[in-house]
Image: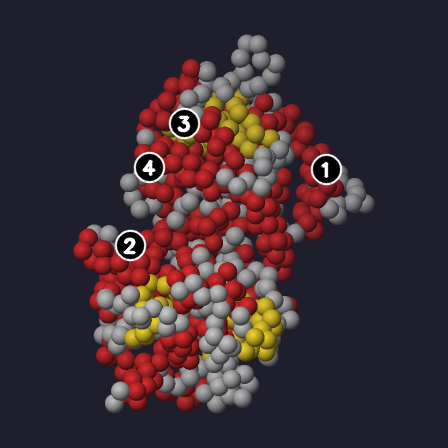
Amino acid sequence: MQPTSHSFKENARQALGDANLQKALKLMQSGFPARRAASIARLPEFDALRDQGKAIKDHVLENLDVYLETFEKNVVAQGGEVHWCRTPQEAREAVLAICRRLGAKTVTKGKTMIAEEIALNDYLEANGVTPVETDLGEYIIQIRREYPSHIIAPALHLVKEQVAESFRATHKGLDAKRALEDAPTLVAEARSILRQKFLAADIGLTGANFCVAETGSTLIVTNEGNGDLTQTLPKAHIVLASIEKLTPTLEDVSTILRLLTRSATGQEFSAYTTVSTGPRRADDTDGPQEYHVVFLDNGRSAMLGTEFQDMLRCIRCGACMNHCPVYATVGGHAYGWVYPGPMGAVLTPTLVGIDEAGHLPNASTFCGRCESVCPMKIPLPQMMRHWREREFAQKRSPAAYRYGLAFWAFFARRPALYRLAIGLAARILGSIGGPRGRFRSLPLAGGWTQGRDLPAPEGRTFMSLWAARRKRISP
Amino acid sequence: MPDTPIRVGLFVTCLVDLFRPTVGFAAVKLLEDAGCLVEVPARQTCCGQPAYNSGDKSDAKAIARDAIEAFAGFDHVVVPSGSCAGMIRRHFPLLFTDEPETRAKAEDLSRRTHELVSFLADVLKLDRVPETRYAGIVTYHDACSGLRELGIKAQPRRLLQSVDGLRLTELPGAETCCGFGGTFCIKYPAISDRMVADKAADIAATGADTLLAGDLGCLLNMAGKLTRLGSELRVRHVAEVLAGMTETVPPIGGVAAQG
């Protein structure tokens, strides 16, 4: 997909006026955070687990080469194959090559953000292979020709009436009288369509929440069971994963799993936790004949050893966006690419470039709620600040803003001059605004005063009043 | 009261200095009532957050260096803002990772610096303020930096309990950002405005007649939205209520003879 992160402001303006989106975002705010809080309240060792999870990921990132090679060795030992891809194009080609070799017409897909990152669906379609999303949220946005607005709840921006409308518009032969008024009826309708697709698919493609080095296994967590059908029924199973998904052992996986599901949905465990190890063996009753892991780097290895390395600990739980007041106000599409919210504000500039995504690390109030809920203790605000430092050093921020800042800093670095200037400002603003106590409009503050008043200064600065008081006490 | 009074340097903050000196005097009164000797170094300007959060590390460092010098020698440095106190405590040392000498000074300042209410409650161990009255139903917004960088949550509530006539009613979503965000409200005013509109609705729904918080930036934002909406709610810095200064000074954004 073409990123639209550069028009974040315009995207946000539209989002603020979208009644359905606003309704959906209100529902999110009352849902995810409360469920997470309740599940964590039942697990007193949660914070200690965060430290353990962080230590596991930090260790992997320090030794990524070793674990990647161990993983490949064990995948091959199980009869599978690993494909190394530096760029989205290489990853797309690797998937298509498997499809071509097996003569595949359709590919069923479990939820994978990496497929979104490399825009796999468009590529497969253009090359005559039909991708079928089987995760309900992904399926809904696929038929609407949209992209995810949330990394674990891709259709979060929609209300159920919009989903019903889309089903009626796309599902041929759907009885007009059939009720589609709530989640169960919508799920039943989607299931009736998808069941046939599962059986007809040539290849099943999933993501991976974990790639386990010691066993060469990949592991996914889902709640709909679509992942299992996607990967066991077709001839081949392709796992699409990014390189930082490596985890040393199954024991480590179980530690991080306890953090992942609670942070994501507030569940102690997801409905399905599926481990895949190689293709079907001789005495297996089912399973794919081929097992492929397509590994994508796409700039991640270049983050190692930089101030952005901590970001590679991210396990894609979505807690940061579930708790972000900016995300809750504008939704995920405003961010203009695959990864929204605080984690997107850090990651997107590394993946699509700071020219495209410069707004994202700026569009944060630094309220710190993301970092406080992050199971991997990623210092998200600090990393957004790193982006702002780069932006400032390269003079990319808007000129008016830079000049304003330089003007202010000139005074802030000279206390005596600052005193005079602020004293003057207090008197002028105080005498104009004082009688009403506030300004309804003010030059250079139009953004603020469009929707709110600016309380007026009291008239004298604290420092001048303090100096006067000192004089009275000890003349 | 100790024999040698505690020497406190007051970091006024740029917003208090310009917009609301009353908060500074409320801080002075609370500290003096608690037996502290308060001084206000004339060399102070700002904690440097506008530069720091805009990626302008060089100006942020210069401003921090000045503050470090200006506040050398005090037993404690007290700040009537969680955001500026958080900047000094959490971020000043990070600015000087490559300058060991300044870093040591920054860490020393960090250890001595406290947000006003947490200083009263956690350092001076006060559980009440000297006899004060405030007739009103109060709700409290937890400003983000104070809450998450400094753990300020129970302290203001505890001290407010000791104010005669005051009834506290909790604000649903008290820990959700009001949309001020320093430079954020300048760069993204439309998003900031919607966030504070949601906050104002939550505040109004409590039925309280007074909104308090510990950070002037957030207070200017919320007061500005409430007055624009025609709300009669009075908005004040928590220190004004604790220091009993509400009779003489109108609420934020209000005019005399209201408070």
In percent of width and height, residue A241 lies at 45, 32
As shown in the figure, which amino acid type bears the numbered disc 2?
A: Leu
A178 left or right of A311 in image: right
Q: How far apart are marks 1 and 3 (CA)?
A: 39 Å
**Residue at coordinates 48% horizontally, 34% vertically from top-left?**
A256
In percent of width and height, residue B68 lies at 24, 65
Labels in figure, total: 4
Question: Which image quadrant: the C terminus of chain B?
Answer: bottom right
Residue tagged by mark 4?
A301
Mark nearer the N terminus (1 vs 3): 1
The residue marked by circle 2 belongs to what chain? B
Q: Distance between the residues labelled 3 and 2?
A: 32 Å
The residue marked by circle 4 belongs to what chain? A
Front label number (1 vs 3): 3
Q: Is residue A453 among what the camera can see?
A: no
Residue tagged by mark 2?
B94
Residue tagged by mark 3?
A248
Q: Is residue A187 among what the camera can see?
A: yes
Query: What is the number of the mark on residue A188?
Result: 1
The answer to whether dots 4 and 3 both sit on one chain is yes
